[in-house]
Amino acid sequence: MEARLNARPCLRAAIIAGFLLFAPRLAADDLCGATILADLKLDSDLSCPGDGLFVGADNVKINLNGHTIAGSGMGVGITLRARHDVVIHGGTITDFVTGIFVSNSSGVVVKENRLTRNREAVFLIASSGNVVKGNIAWQNLLRGIMIRPNASGVVSTQNLVVENTLTANPSGILLFAQPGNILKENLIAESTVAGIDLTGGGSAGNVMKENILTANAAGIKFGPGWTGNRIVENSFQMNTCGVQGTADDNTFKENVFSSNGSDSCF
């Protein structure tokens, strides 16, 4: 595996100026709990009893290379805190509390991963200017993708959530009182709470565009206080309720409603 790690002492002793010198090959699972400081390309699966990987530097690419990071129902698959310009792509993350946790970070790209049986697949908190693209998240316990502020009120804004397939998660995408995000071209199906769940006291300036929302309990669920958002060119198909809650003070344009139990309900 190509990486510089802040991990076990035996590995640190074998790394000099970024080069691995004649160290014995580590078992793949020895990476569990490691802090990654440079580009990493997995060459085997990981099975981690607690946390998976921590990203400890900016401008790092994590290439899962088709492999799986599997947990035991605890910890986080990949954690980023106060990191910038990181890419995570190309593998499966399963059976953690959170699959990928992004805190106080920007310029992070999470793309083309598969995430299942976590509490939530991808969690952005107090993080702005990130991209979550082309992932498949299914049968997570609570949420596919969650975006929210931290306890100090630092918001998550200007994030792009695009071209993801989110199936059989209670909430496909949950926005918790966050402004100015774009949710675009996602396929969200079989959510038992809502495809897009807007909660947490309300916010404005979000754009929900060209999403396909099908067979959900609600296509989009509006909690109190959500005003000044744009809902444009979405397809609401076969949902129990197309749009749930008070949504009058938002802009709806060129959406298509078909075969819902009710197009709108309260």
Image (cartoon, rainbow, N blue to C red):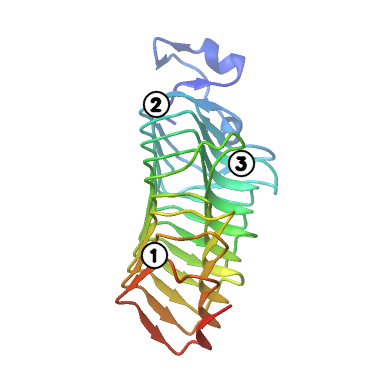
Q: Spatial distance from mark 3 to mark 1, Cα to Cα?
A: 24 Å
Q: Position of residue 39 (x, y in %)?
A: 38, 29
- Which quadrant does the C terminus fall into? bottom right
The residue beneath circle 2 is 58
- The disc labelled 1 sits on which kind of residue? Asn
For the residue pair 197 and 130, the one nearer the viewer reads as 197
Q: Are marks 3 and 2 in contact (CB under 8 Å)?
A: no
Is disc 3 surrounded by few (<14), some (14 to 19) or many (20+) residues within 10 Å? many
- The disc labelled 2 sits on which kind of residue? Asp
Q: Position of residue 178 (x, y in %)?
A: 48, 49
Is disc 2 surrounded by few (<14), some (14 to 19) or many (20+) residues within 10 Å? some
For the residue pair 39 and 140, the one nearer the viewer reads as 140
Helix, strand or loop status at disc 3: strand
Q: Position of residue 125 (x, y in %)?
A: 53, 41
For the residue pair 7 and 143, the one nearer the viewer reads as 143
- Rendered residue at 34%/77% (across/down): 255
Quarter residue 248 falls in? bottom left
